[in-house]
Amino acid sequence: MNRYFQTPPVVKNLIIINLLVFMATMLLPVGPQIERWCALWVGMPLFRTYQFVTYMFLHANLEHLFFNMFALWMFGRTLEYELGPKRFLVYYMICGVGAALIQAGIAWAMHEPMTLVGASGAVMGLLLAFGVLHPNAVIMLIFPPIPMKAKWFVIIYGVIELLLGWRGGGNVAHFAHVGGMLWGLLLLYWWRRCGIIRF
């Protein structure tokens, strides 16, 4: 079987961890305590620095979890094979932590407390990496159902997220999405400068 149709270990384990944490928060009596200590509470008494990591493994609902894990599976498989398991995990975590830093910085600057959960920032970093490393690969959109080259999809998606972030409102951390893409882009160019990858 072609390796690109298999799920490599880091992607598989990340999906499993996210699923287990979601089930724990939904089904176990300690679920509220897990959310209390592991979500990122920006500008609130519950804030702890380790939450910049743990927030990535919590999700608000099943839909939130499904779309993040589907994108992790869809883009992460190719990237893990190309970058290698260790470098892929480093990339994923840096994008996730970086996304939270960007969102938290903006929240602090605007004096707006917020709670952040979800792997979206890290996943957006994966989308960015796929678009950079495979710019002409065709992605089939769901809504609307049209094919689009990865490079244009990444650019359009990034601009939309940036505009929605400036607009404000809602429960979606748009600047975290943009932050994940930004940190991913910086890391890719750093690795290229060091001769680790080519694109």
Image (cartoon, rainbow, N blue to C red):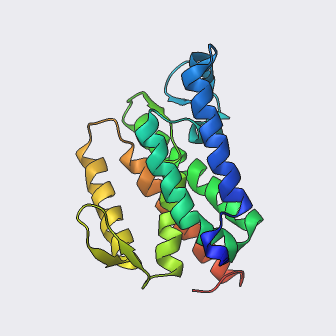
Q: Is residue 11 above or below residue 171?
A: below
Residue pictured at 65% horizontal, 35% vertical: 20
Q: Residue furthest front?
A: 1
For the residue pair 117 and 102, the one nearer the viewer reads as: 117
Image point (60%, 48%), residue name: 97
The residue depicted at 45 percent of the width and 32 percent of the height is 60
Residue at the far right: name it: 86
Q: Is residue 80 visible?
A: yes
**Does residue 52 appear anywhere in the picture?**
no
Q: Position of residue 180 (x, y in %)?
A: 50, 56
Q: Is residue 158 above or below residue 122?
A: below
Percent position of residue 143, x then y: 25, 61
Q: Is residue 40 above or below residue 188?
A: above
Of residues 118 and 63, which is closer to you in this image? 63
In screen coordinates, is 184 left or right of 89? left
Quadrant (top left, top right, bottom left, bottom right) of the C terminus: bottom right
**Residue occupying image coordinates x 71% and y 85%:** 195
Classify the position of the N terminus by image quarter. bottom right
Displayed quadrant of residue 161: bottom left
Residue 142 at x, y percent in the picture? 30, 62
- Residue 112 x/y as whole percent: 38, 30
Q: Nearer the viewer, residue 187 or 170?
A: 170
- Give the left or right position of residue 193, taking residue 44 as reference: right
Determine the image quadrant of residue 38: top right
| Left or right position of 139 against 25 | left
